[in-house]
Structure formats: structure tokens, C-alpha cells
Amino acid sequence: MKIAAKLISFKFLICLLSALALLYIVYPFASIVTFFDPENIISSIQRPELVDAFILSIVTASVSTGIIILFGIPLAYCLSRYNFPGKSILFVVVVIPLVLPPLASGALLLGVFNPSSILNLWFPEIEFTQSIIGIIVAQTYVASPFMILASLTAFGAIDKSLEDIARILGKKNWKVFIQVSLPLAKRGILIGIVMTWIRAIGELGATLMLAYNPHTISIQIYEDNAIGGLTYAIPSILLSIILSIVLVLLYTTLIKKIDTINFDRNDFPTLENHRRYD
């Protein structure tokens, strides 16, 4: 009886804390109803500047995520597999954009990409600030830790003996990376890709400093609220919520597909199936 009472108390406490957490998350969405104007919502959501900001955010976030994938995954693999002087310092450098206030990140980027910087002297034809390039630079800098840290964790969870077997069988390092490491780490990498894309879409602070124009959806929400209050900003907020829901559903579907894949002996490097890696 005492054990049962303890379990009931524990379950009650967990359920209570969970309910409070969910209430805290859900309540702001419910409060939107109080600012919702059905008569003007359709016309407002079709405003050219809002549509342009929405499309621009999707495009720039996708480009930024692609750049981070290209450079972030190799960096994560390097940190996971190799030991070298200054490795701990490099890890701190990777994490800094995650803990640094976004406005501070934007200020740092502005110091590098301002019109009088060396980069602008080298590439005078490229507009780094107040441009789409500036948006991508800001998104890439702020969102990069999400991809790198998720991939680092994914690579760290791999049994290194599988990679060693592939090398013993004569496979070059790049083949081991592509055919063994990446497939085994794909779930964590996918999580990193989704988190990176979401962070890039929602980026405001660094973008505000480096490229206020053209407007991303986050800056559009900021400006709409400044001009007409929360009621005027509701359409852009709704677009962001819809995009988030679609992305979460897509992510959930992909994760389920990955989890349902049944790996058998032929999926791993062994003496019997090493020809699969030729």
C-alpha cells in the first residue's frame, strides 16, 4: 500500500508539472483570439510586404541551412573523431553563437561586414548589409551551433568499431564517412537540420543589426507590432505558426520513417558484405 501510494503521488506530481508546462506553452496561442479580427485577417495576410517577407524567410533559411550542412557536419565529425591541440577552445568557439545574445552577434557581424570593412574593400560589388546576403550571413552565424552540436552528438553515439572494420577492409576515409558514419548518424543529423532551419526562420536580433531590409518574417512581425500593435501583427504571426506546424509534422513523419527502417547484418561493414562499400 505504501509503495502504491508513493507511485500515485509521483505520477500525480509528474502529471501536474506536465500540465502546467503545457498550459504555459498553449496559453499564448489561445490569447491570440482576443486580438483576432476575422474581417480583416484575409486582406491583411495577403499584403504584398507580408507575402514577400514570408517567402524571403523560407528561401534565406533554406540557403543558410544548406551552407551550415556543408561546413557544419564535417566540423562536427572532426570534433568527434580527432584529437588535436586547442580542441576544447574550438568547441567553445562553436558554442558561442548559441549563448551570445543575438543583438551582440549582429554587432560582431556588423564589425566584419560593414561598408568600411576589409571584406567590402576586397569585394566592393557585393552588398553585405541591408541585403539578402546579409540576412543569410546573420542566419548562418546564429543557427550554426544547432547543426554542429546535434551532429557532434550523433557521431559520438556511433560505435567506432564499425568505422574501423570498414577501414580494415580497405575503404578510404571518405567512403567510411559517406557510407558508414553518415547513415548511422542520420537521425541526429536530421534533428540538427530541422532545428537549424527553424532557428534561421526565427532569427531577428542579428538580422536586425546586419540587414533590416529586406524584411524577413521576424522583422515584419516586429515592424507590424511597432506600427499597429499586436492586432496588426497577427497575420504574420499566423503565417509563422502555420509554417511551424507544417515543419513539425514533416519532421515527425521523417523521424518515424527512419525509426521504422530495419537494419540487418547487411547494413554494416563485415567480412561477408564488404563489397557493398566498393
Image: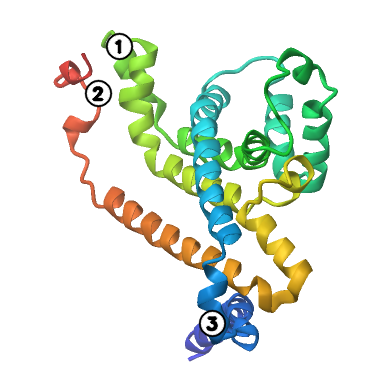
User: Which residue is the site of mark 1?
Assistant: 171
User: Which residue is the site of mark 2?
Assistant: 269
Lateral position of residue 73 relative to residue 109, left or right: left
Q: Mark 3: give few (<14), some (14-19) or many (20+) Cα within 10 Å.
A: few
**Residue 98 pos. (x, y %):** 70, 44
Residue type at mark 1 is Lys
Nearest the eye: 133 or 179? 133
Q: In the displayed structure, would residue 230 be above or below residue 125? A: below
**Residue 91 pos. (x, y %):** 68, 30
Q: In the displayed structure, would residue 32 be above or below residue 191? A: below
Q: Residue 227 — which label?
A: none
Q: Tell us which disc is closer to us: 1 or 2.
A: 1
Instruction: Give the spatial CA distance, label 1 vs label 3.
Output: 51 Å
Residue type at mark 3 is Cys
Disc 1 + disc 3, Cβ < 8 Å = no
Q: Is mark 2 on a helix, strand or loop?
A: loop
Determine which quarter of the picture holds residue 79: top right
User: Which residue is the site of mark 3?
Assistant: 15
Nearest the eye: 237 or 158? 237
Q: Which colour scheme is used?
A: rainbow
Disc 1 + disc 2, Cβ < 8 Å = yes
